[in-house]
Image (cartoon, rainbow, N blue to C red):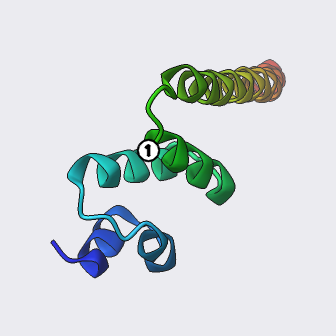
């Protein structure tokens, strides 16, 4: 698969892939995963540099844990919004049924 095909297939900008022009499937897989879960360019760069270091497991795990907490916070916020939206829908329907 060419870098252009990976860009189209995975929706990763070609420029981002060119910066990590790496034919190592493991690195490419990690790059794709980081992009898909919402890592910013700087975060990806940091993570990819750490992958090259010998004892970086702890640092990479902390990065992933921070991202996980942020995503969970966002999910909980969206769930609260959804609950409020559902309440408003329920209120309107209840009023409609009274008529």
On the image, the x and y values in percent for residue 5 come to 24, 76
User: Is the residue 75 above or below the residue 50 in the image?
Assistant: above
Q: Residue at x 51, y 42 (%)?
A: 37
On the image, the x and y values in percent for residue 73 come to 74, 23
Q: Residue at x 57, y 28 (%)?
A: 64
Among the 4 quarters of the image, the one containing residue 63: top right
- Given residues 62 and 35, the one toward you in this image is 62
User: Is the residue 66 above or below the residue 34 in the image?
Assistant: above
Kindly identify which residue carries mark 1.
Answer: 52
* Neighbour tally class for label 1: few under 14, some 14-19, many 20 plus, Cα within 10 Å: few
Q: Secondary structure at mark 1?
A: loop
Task: Classify residue 64 as left or right of residue 23.
Answer: right
User: Is the residue 30 above or below the residue 5 in the image?
Assistant: above
On the image, the x and y values in percent for residue 94 come to 78, 19
- Given residues 54 and 14, the one toward you in this image is 54
Among the 4 quarters of the image, the one containing residue 10: bottom left
Q: Residue at x 79, y 28 (%)?
A: 81
User: Is the residue 28 above or below the residue 53 in the image?
Assistant: below
- Given residues 20 and 15, the one toward you in this image is 20
Among the 4 quarters of the image, the one containing residue 28: bottom left
Q: Residue furthest front?
A: 54
Q: Residue at x 81, y 18 (%)?
A: 98
Task: Classify residue 94 as left or right of residue 32.
Answer: right
């Amino acid at each position: 698969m060419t870098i252009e095909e990976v860009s189209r297939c995975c929706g990763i900008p070609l420029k981002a892939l060119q910066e990590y022009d790496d034919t190592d499937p493991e690195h490419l897989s990690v790059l794709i995963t980081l992009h898909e879960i919402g890592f910013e360019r700087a975060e990806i760069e940091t993570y990819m540099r750490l992958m090259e270091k010998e004892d970086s497991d702890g640092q990479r795990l902390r990065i992933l844990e921070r991202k996980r907490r942020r995503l969970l916070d966002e999910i909980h916020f969206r769930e609260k919004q959804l609950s409020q939206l559902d309440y408003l829908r329920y209120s309107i329907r209840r009023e409609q049924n009274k008529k």
